[in-house]
Amino acid sequence: MIDISFAGLIGAFIGTVIAALAYAPLVSSIERHLRARAAGAGTAENTVDNGILRQEISLLRRGVFAADIIVFAGLGYWLAARLAN
């Protein structure tokens, strides 16, 4: 059976809250970098590039959200479980 500590669950919850707070600044800085790089390319096919850029940004947001939650919640669980012992 899996042994899950209560302190670890509290730490995972706190890590998830921290991940939610860190998500917006992280995504906006990465998105700003991508938009600046796309504007620097300056091709004649801007309408196609804008559509692709929107799709990439949407995928980027989902990926950053998933990684952010997994990393911070896992780190919070591990840290709280270690401190409880």
Image: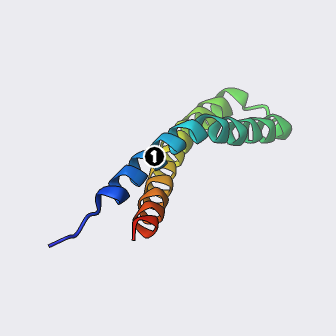
Residue 59 visible to the viewer: no
The C terminus lies in quadrant: bottom left
Q: Quadrant of the N terminus?
A: bottom left
Quadrant position of residue 35: top right
In the rendered image, which residue does mark 1 sit on? 14
Viewer-side residue, 32 vs 47: 32
**Residue at 49% from the left image edge and 57% from the top image edge:** 71
Q: Position of residue 77 (x, y in %)?
A: 41, 59
**Residue 20, x across and y down, in percent:** 51, 38
Q: Is residue 23 left or right of residue 43?
A: left
Number of other residues with Cα within 10 Å of mark 1, as a class: few under 14, some 14 to 19, many 20 or more: some
Left-right relation of 66 to 26: left
- Please tell me in which quadrant of the rendered image residue 2 appears: bottom left
Q: Secondary structure at mark 1?
A: helix
Q: Nearer the viewer, residue 84 or 17?
A: 84
Examine the rendered structure and indicate whether residue 6 appears above or below residue 31: below
Task: Count numbered badges in the picture.
Answer: 1
**Where residue 80 appears, x then y in whole percent?**
44, 60
Residue 46 visible here: yes
Query: Compared with residue 41, is residue 81 higher up or lower down, i.e. above or below?
Result: below
